[in-house]
Image (cartoon, rainbow, N blue to C red):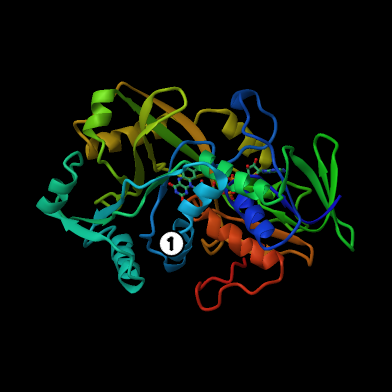
Amino acid sequence: MGFDVIVVGAGLWGSACARHLSAMGARVALVGPAEPQDAAAHNGVFASHYDEARITRRLDNSRDWALFADAAMRRYAEIETLGGQKFFHKVGALMAGPESGVGSNYMRDTAAVAQAESIAHDALRGAALQERFPFFDFPDGILGLFEKEGGWINPRAHVAAEIGAGVANGVTLVQDEVVEVEDIGNGVTVRCAGGETLQADKVVVAGGAFSKAPGLLPDPVPLQVYARTIAFVEIDAAEAERLKDMPSVVYFYPDGAGDCYVLPPVLYPDGKTYLKIGGDPTDVELSTVSEMKEWFRGDGDPKAADYMVAQLFKLMPNLASQGVSHNSCVTSFTPRSTPLIYGQSERVYAVTGGNGAGAKCADEIGRLGALKVLGKPLPENRYQTDFLL
Ligand SMILES: Cc1cc2nc3c(=O)[nH]c(=O)nc-3n(C[C@H](O)[C@H](O)[C@H](O)COP(=O)(O)OP(=O)(O)OC[C@H]3O[C@@H](n4cnc5c(N)ncnc54)[C@H](O)[C@@H]3O)c2cc1C
């Protein structure tokens, strides 16, 4: 059977794009493998959403990213219902950092975007910040912008909800890896690792960092892919209870030496509860697909994990840890730090470039990708970016 559109990549953006395409009336195939059971032994592609929690918030120093998130977050409840999967946990999101001096740009710009776009939040300082969030020990001079409507999403459940809703609407799911996309002039042919060949009028490549893989897009997609380590601090039931009102946090260190993000207690599939911290001290670029796969097979950089855990204990000196572990992931950055949604030919489109921020707004990016592929106008005057290189 021929399709109108084949979406390559059943991840956060691809699954959303497929759902929106089908809702817009297209006959859609969504092609992508399930998460590998044994990452260390896996030779195929990986994804940046293999985890239980991603921060979601409108507060951002970039107006466009704030608006992408806002549009997506407004649809969370609807997607959960359509897809039969709960993924959003409204525990609030706190952006914190120095209010003046070194490293204060982010907070200043975020406050300005929040004001211009009427993003509901509380601004907290000093004793008020301490009282509201007694488990954090911020130094003097820190401003906290708290968005009550933020929190975290489970990215695996988000993907499952988008796929569930898409399939219910007629999307054909093919759980395989695509090895080649060919523009044959009057359509596209998509060849899968398992031997299946699919045909359609158009194709969308939404393979995350693996959109760089040879054979998928006619032109190389300009992504800079960075190795990321995430550290997990296991906590027991009493500590989880003490931290039950903890929000998701993004914290810019007062000395301007970078930032971290911290997820509140989340129950993982191994039955244990963890706090998660990310925010690598250095950027290590992964240039080839082989390097990306090798990185994903490992469990991250122990030195980076030690650094991040030390930062976490500075922020939460009373944290009662039951042990620390770490894992690997990658983030893909674009030349202008905005998502890429563009046609490389009349038939072959790229929808990629999460810039470390693409989980929360996946449904809006997917929708914009669907509009682009179907030749419909993107929302005029809403976003400043043109989604090009
Ligand atoms: C450690 C870490 C923390 C993050 N924290 C946050 C956060 O707190 N908030 C936030 O908003 N964002 C966060 N992000 C970013 C977010 O996870 C990414 O922006 C998001 O996953 C991008 O979605 P994507 O669909 O483009 O890529 P992915 O999620 O990587 O999905 C790509 C999909 O394509 C598939 N694929 C690839 N190649 C092929 C192929 N050849 N054939 C078929 N399928 C293929 C893969 O299997 C995968 O399912 C974080 C990222 C990392 C790494």
Q: Is residue 278 visible?
A: yes
156 horizontally vs 289: left or right = left
Q: Is residue 121 above or below residue 88?
A: below
Relative to 233, is 153 above or below?
A: below
Q: Residue at x 47, y 41 (%)?
A: 154
Residue at x-position 57% and y-position 48%: 12
| Mark count | 1
Residue 201 sits above or below residue 317 on the image? below
Q: Where's residue 164, x and y in %?
A: 61, 44
Residue hosting label 1: 70
Percent from the top left, x then y, of residue 247?
29, 45
Image location of residue 36, percent across then percent down: 63, 29
Residue drawn at 24 percent across, 27 percent down: 239
- For the residue pair 367 and 289, the one nearer the viewer reads as 367
Q: Local crowd at mark 1 within 10 Å, few (<14), some, or many (≥20)? A: many
Q: Is residue 357 visible?
A: no
Looking at this view, is 93 or 83 the one in front? 83
Q: Residue at x 86, y 60 (%)?
A: 187
